[in-house]
Amino acid sequence: MLTLTCPVCGVDACETELAAGGEAHLKRFGPGSTDDQFEEYLFLRPNAKGVHFERWRHAMGCGKWFLAARDTATLEVFGTYSAQTTAPPADIVNAIRAKRPDWSPET
Amino acid sequence: MSTRLPDHGRLIDRSRQVKFTFNGKWMRGHPGDTLASALLANGQTLVGRSFKYHRPRGIVASGGEEPNALVNLGRGARHEPNQRATTTELYERLEATSQNHWPTLEFDVGAVNAMVARFLPAGFYYKTFIHPRAFWKHVFEPIIRKSAGLGAAPDPETMDADRYEHFYAHVDLVVAGGGVAGLLAALEAGRAGKRVLLVEQNAHWGGRAPVDGDLIDGAPAEIWVKNAVEELEKMENVTFRTRTMLAGVYDHGYVTAYERVADHTPGEDAPRHRLWRIRTAQVISATGAIERPLSFPGNDKPGVMLASAVRDYIVNYGVAPGDTVVIVTNNDDGYRTALAAHRAGLKVACVVDPRAEADGDLPHEVRSLGIRVMAGSAISKVKGLKKVVSVRVQAHRGYDGGHEEIPCDAVAMSGGWSPVVHLWSHCGGKLTWDEDQACFRPDHDRPPTDQNGAGFVTCVGAADGALNGDVTMAATATAMAGLLGSDVSAPRVDVAREAPLAPIWVMPEAAGAKKRAKMWLDFQNDVKVSDVTLAAQEGYESVEHTKRYTTLGMATDQGKLSNINGLAVLAEALDKGIPQVGTTTFRPPYTPISMGAIAGEARGEVFQPLRRTPIHDWHEEQGAYMEPVGGWRRPYCFPRDGESHEDAVNREIDATRRSLGLLDASTLGKILVKGPDAGRFMDMLYTNMMSNLKPGKCRYGLMCSENGFLMDDGVVVRLDEDTFLAHTTSGGADHVHTHMEDWLQCEWWDWKVHTVNVTEQWAQIAVVGPNARKVLEKLGPDFDLSAEALPFMAMAEGKIGGFDTRVFRISFSGELSYEIAVPASQGRAFWDALHEAGAEWNATAYGTEALHVMRAEKGFIMIGDETDGTIIPQDLGLNWAISKKKDDFLGKRGQERVHMTDPDRWKLVGLETLDGSVLPDGSYCIASGKNANGQANVQGRVTSTYYSPTLSRGIAMGLVQNGPDRMGEVVAFNKVDGSTVEAKIVSPVFYDPDGEKQNV
């Protein structure tokens, strides 16, 4: 039962209050995209063991979506941040690097 | 035989007696007894039968690790199977019966399995029940089902008579285990001002130290324990509970504990069990250790027990497991049992020790009492059928033919101790193999980690591998000092020093196949040394696979006794080290917890809150037959006196089509979408064009997932330039609203739109039928309801009969229809007013089934009937509702994929049986030929099927391959009895295809 801090309302929310929404920072491909692009967008996920960016909704709280950077193996949370962004913000990237020096955003 | 001793028994109250029954026979015990100690006190050493061979089984342990003494407890609504006698506190009139035998415990026909044991080796099921194929269903499966399972399942019709509840706690520190290590940890944390919850699974504090006679600060451990509890009682920041087991440790410090509040006082007005749901920063696991059995031939016979359990029964309960005891141990601790038995006046025939030398303090003390110590020896046979009669002792190593028969009626075995590392492991803590003590213990470098990446479980005392009494307290103090950042001084413990154990798992060393087939590892599941060896021979190298192949450790005790011994045997067979073989995964709960505790209060009426429409009470007053829909109860139909549901539905349809029907449509989802970009947003959500909808107009819309599949449908109303009202299906409002918010918040967050789910703000009533307009006009609208002023698919707002209404001229029945929304608070009054005014037109309330039949007569689809998550709108002939002008909408790209545009997809048609009968629901349309599995090929299926009272015949909708191109063709649908029924492919619109009825 994870605890994540909702960056919108500030509550330390237990997993029972939250709804998971899969991988974050997906780029949407609509009409005009190739089959490969659409397949990747809709279905292909790296399912990382380690650093992972995820979508969560504070479903039983303020109702807002937010994003979380987390280690799927150790359950360490590097930070949560606004869903209104296309890439992890610098403070989150720095927080990950401080704990995982070998990690780079591209991998 | 086992009996009550004249003295000893620190936990029992000899001044009082407790009567109970075992298999119908009255017995007596004392308050403080467990069922197990009371059974032994009454000479009942045979308590059950094993799972596979139905071998006689006696009590082995004294705690939660007990694999054998499982009983049915109670009767009727309080019957519960598989209860461990060792953890069941005795109470007045307790009723217990033994399990897994027929006809009686003493004489069990199933024991014949044991005679054919060599034909029932590891993996027997996998090897045997394959051929002949036809035997499975009629021979093998019925036999396996009959013999499977242990206790009798409770009667499914009986409601549990007890109540259960959940408790929530938020603390700094949870201490699991109320032995001396746990008490010390709780004391130190309490003194440091932490909020502490201390739980102990037993009914008493102190763990093993008082039993083993440890001296703490120069006094008996019992004194120190008493003082510790008294100090804890005074601390306001410390909460503690006995009879409470820490069941599981989960992510980020979520912990569950299982409190057996009233198991020992059944029928009292208290919740029986309580599940604690705890958030804690730290977990201190002071869970101690569990003694391991030894594997020698006949080690499963009643009378063979763990050495520590023998000690417990003598010291705690004043019960002797036998008159003459043989002790067999590979370590010094087992000698404590010799001392305890001797002090209690039992005869200790000898101590059998496979170690070449036994020269520690404890063996020395035992010898000094004149007790025979046989070093370098092993038990090679246990004689006796249902109880031990004697043991045969020979050299452990280098058997020269010499052996000795030693009469005894109890054998106390000790294979060393395994730290209880379960709580460390539940959330991912790793273990390391301790070569000296031959056990797995927590690897401090690899703890389970919390949200900060820091370890949050600390094992202290024996659970951390500090097994000897003299180091347990000191190690606990050191660990707590590290955790609390303060000085912690350990009490001084005086206890005999122990010499190292010998990692001996199987005895005698050179035992052959025949003897190994009589050495039990898992007593409950009948897994023997020979089974694990066989699995290794057959190529099972992974411990997880071996576990499942042999069922080792899969019994209700989850390998608490068998785990390490089984691993050791596997490691030996594979010629690997135990750490290389590794251990199976420890999963919560630590011991089984009741389903009642998990459910807590969530049963009956409070299982799920019921959603009620403003008109709900009226439906109940009318005796409506209700069905669950999206958290609501909706009337399926309103049967009148003596009327069947079918007749009621037909009457409701008839009344509606002929004159006037009223439907409570309040459950319909209503979502407000508002803002300058609302039109643009609606265009993305719906397949249709919504941005060009004129204010005051309605449009039926389809909503697809990004995958292209039809997700929801409903009428969209444009209230004004900036505002849309999206109607969703009854069950779909929450889901659709979530879907909208997802796209708004995560993809198009710069669009100026907001959404509000207003479903429960409005009551909505459909006024349907040729007289619909008349009843509204009679009530007195302050606006024009005529066909010209308010045509089909238009909306208007105003007062009708004094009610604030919003009127939508939409129809799901094909009749002249007004769906009228009023504020929820006015819903019931408006409903009553409509009935009163409509009486002259026989206003008839109709339910969901009439709604379904009428929509099917009109060929309208229903989400969940015509769709199942794999259907695109094009399959349903809804191309007219898919905009070709829009560049993009959710699902557009998905629908362009090759499989979605395949001309051979199954498509919606109407179906008319040639004989007028109603097609079976879900029936398949048969095609020629058979598939690879010998099943008939299919070319379609029925999605909705009803009897139409309007047409006096069965009508159906279905998806058929190329269906729309095959109008008039007759196809066959299968029936449950194997026959088929012929149906003609027709248009799905059976009634009023030109819409003349609704457009008046």
Image (cartoon, coloured by chain):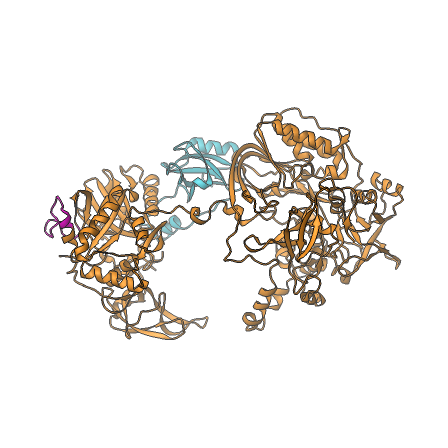
Residue B123 percent location from the top left of the image: 64, 62
Per the rendered image, the range of residues in magenta is B776-793
Check the image and report above or below for B643 versus B185. below
Residue B464 percent location from the top left of the image: 67, 38
Q: Nearer the viewer, residue B8 or B19?
A: B19
Q: How many marks?
A: 0
The extreme front residue here reads: B16
- Indicate the quadrant containing the C terminus of chain B: top left, top right, bottom left or bottom right: bottom left
Is any part of residue B515 visible from this angle?
yes
Q: Nearer the viewer, residue B601 or B923?
A: B601
The extreme top residue here reads: B487
Q: Residue at x 60, y 53 (%)?
A: B74
Indicate the quadrant where residue B345 lies. Answer: top right
Q: Residue at x 70, y 32 (%)?
A: B225
Colour chosen for chain A: cyan
Is any part of residue B716 visible from this angle?
no
Q: Nearer the viewer, residue B929 or B7?
A: B7
